[in-house]
Amino acid sequence: MNFGSVLRNSWDIIWKNKVLWIFGILASCSGGGANFGSGFNYQTGTRDTSNFSPEFERFWRGFQQFLDQGGWAIIVAIACAAILIGLLIWVVGIFGKVGLIKGILKAESGGAVRFGALAYESWGMLGSALGLNLVLILIPLAGVIILAILAIPIGILTLGIGLICLICLLVPLALAYGVYTQLANIALVREQRGVGAALLGAWELMRTQLGPLAAMAVVLTLGGLLVSVVLLLPLVAIALPAILSFVRNEPEALGRGLLTSGVLFLVALPFYLVASGMIQSYIHSAWTLTYLQLTEALSPAKPPARAKAKKK
């Protein structure tokens, strides 16, 4: 596998087709999620607050009054709204990921990369892409539940050594699963087959081409860490006025510091969105080109064309 060619061509693709940055910004929305769970047992007037400070007692009485006046309904509504917003952001992220992969495939084959066409084609594949990524979320979730159940007996039987080894093993497993997730999404979009076929295709590629995939994962991970450090420095500078004003412990200075940091953040936000789009576009481009090279290497060679018999 030609790593240099993949990295150079990935940059050429995203630089010549800047519309991919928009899908990169959208794809970054699927990078995280939120789980909400609650166990609530409330009884008015049964909480002993005699051992707490007067400030906390006032807060607790106000909170009890808020709940007595129907505040629990507001809390449930806010939680439901947060869940819906989180799901919407996740769907937007998957939509951006599909459009990004489609655009990269078009650019690699020499086709025109247009936002409208990519959005239309991505919308048609959104259902299968959501199904695939839901399965990709459930697989590690099931693994975490199993590990949580086995963690206590493993730790007891091995005096903690097995538990430490298990934790150390999770880091490369998480990295490998991240690669598998990328390959499964690329397989779904490129091959345009079902979820099961995409999962099997990604597994077959990882099983037979583990070495090149691991090397590319290391390169992109180290590069991503370097870029993250570079992008972190301006954020530290933006937060510096608020931090310094907080250290001075003066209300007026704190207000000015927070205002200054807030304005600087709003000014820097468009630049960070563009940077996020470029980074996501480049990562997906590198993995898509890697997928293409490795699958072409696995495909059987085409038989030579037979020469036509000369007419007498």
Image: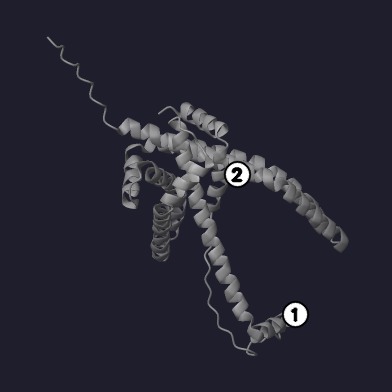
Image spot of residue 156 (x, y percent): 41, 64
Q: Is residue 284 above or below residue 166?
A: above
Q: Nearer the viewer, residue 205 or 185?
A: 185
Q: Which residue is mark 2?
A: 276
| Distance (Cα) linking label 2 and label 1 | 45 Å
What residue did someone put label 1 on? 53
Q: Depth-wise, is mark 2 or mark 1 nearer the camera?
A: 2
- Name the outermost residue toward the top: 312
* Left or right, 150 with reference to 250: left
Query: Measured along the vertical axis of the image, is residue 253 above or below residue 236?
Result: below
Looking at the rendered image, the quarter that the N terminus falls into is top left
Label 2 vs 1, first from the N-terminus: 1
At mark 2, the secondary structure is: helix
| Furthest residue toward bottom | 45
Q: Is residue 221 visible?
A: no
Residue 187 visible in the snapshot: yes
Query: The C terminus lies in which quarter of the figure?
Result: top left
Q: Say which of 54 and 261 sits in front.
A: 261
Which residue: 84% across, 56% down?
Answer: 256
- At which x and y percent is residue 161? 44, 56
